[in-house]
Image: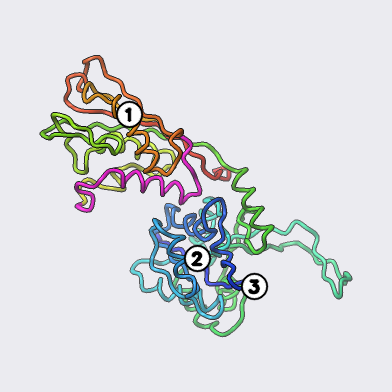
Amino acid sequence: MATVAALVVAAGRGKRMPGEIPKQYRSLAGRPILTHSLAALRNHPQVSAALAVIHPDDLKLYEAATAGLDLLPPVLGGPSRQDSVREGLERLSLLPGVDRVLIHDGVRPLLPVAVIDRVLAALDKTPGAIAGLQVVDTLKRTDGGLITATVSRDGMWRAQTPQGFHLEAILMAHRKSAGRELTDDAAVAEAAGLEVAIVAGDARALKITTESDLRRAERLLAGATETRIGSGFDVHRFGPGDHVMLCGIRVPHGQGLIGHSDADVALHAATDALLGAIGDGDIGQHYPPGDPRWKGAASARFLADAVERLRARGGRLLNLDVTLICEEPRIGPHRDRMRAQVAEILGVAIERINIKATTTEKLGFTGRGEGVAAQAVASVALPAADGA
Ligand code: MG
């Protein structure tokens, strides 16, 4: 299978007043536009690496915008968009195994997964494939405000991004076209004689160039969310110790809980609930118990990472409900602190979190006091998937 990297072009200056923040770093639904664009690609299951090309003046903005995202170090862009893309491609060509690239405008933050899927699928047949929209309006050629001709819209498309290519082919094409002014990467490919397919893009993947585009993107995001639910369950066994960690709170107890990390069974169930809600596997996959990086790790890190994954998809946590199942220790006296702690880890209002506890009437392993179980349910709002 092909190894796909994403290259997000964000080095543009645009035309703006001094002191104004470049538009790719403007906020859209609480996150920079560029963050949405990068996360949309990086979180696609077939994309294994992502790289942004940025302006040297924007390093600080970039770092703030991408904290928590798993990205390659940014490349500093050249004088033109074409130079920037070429610099990015040169860098990607040094990565072992990468053979396909998706080039995307940093100011197209609303990128449906299905568009990425279609571009990648088309690359199995042609060395280039881009997203586009068929022209539906009648086209007029004008001169001085007067119509001189009606142009047939048959076969006419508006090019969007991502534009996907076989890496080697597009890199060669860019090297050949250096210095020429071509408007997009498909044009670079065409100039080199590469076959480029066009597949259905999405009207939501608009390019944000004006204030009104930004407002439209805000409305699209606000009006296009869907609710998802995930569940989590976990058990840890009692062993020697003098305290247990539950919901990030140290609870004094005559025994401890055994586990590779701090064995916080409640946070593990909560982490799995969040990962479940966003369709992103489970805790063992992201923080494998055999990995020395996570040995003795505070489980709060897992939960904080899971909520970051949710935010990277443009989503937010609606509520989380955790049930602790044990005879001992007693949860009641610690419940308020646990709730506050979980809300803090997740960065949400305390009203969105509930912590409750039950026993199993002395039945089963929890009833015999052999360990603690926890289950959690999370609901999240995510940008709506397009029909997928
Ligand atoms: Mg666990």
Q: Which residues are magenta?
A: 292-319
Q: Which residue is mark 2?
A: 8
From mark 2 to mark 3, how far is it between C-alphas? 20 Å
Q: Does residue 326 appear left or right of residue 103 in this picture?
A: left
- Indicate the position of residue 41 as horizontal and vertical percent values: 48, 57
Give, as a three-letter code, the residue at label 3: Lys
Question: Residue visible at 35% across and 25% down?
Answer: 356
Ligand 1 shows up in which quadrant of the image? top left
- The mark nearer the N terminus, 1 or 2, is 2
How many other residues sit within 10 Å of disc 2, few (<14), some (14-19) or many (≥20)? many
Q: Are marks 1 and 2 in contact (CB under 8 Å)?
A: no
- Between 362 and 229, the residue placed more toward the observer is 362
Give, as a three-letter code, the residue at label 1: Arg
- Indicate the position of residue 275 as horizontal and vertical percent values: 39, 41
Give, as a three-letter code, the residue at label 2: Val
Q: Which residue is mark 1?
A: 335
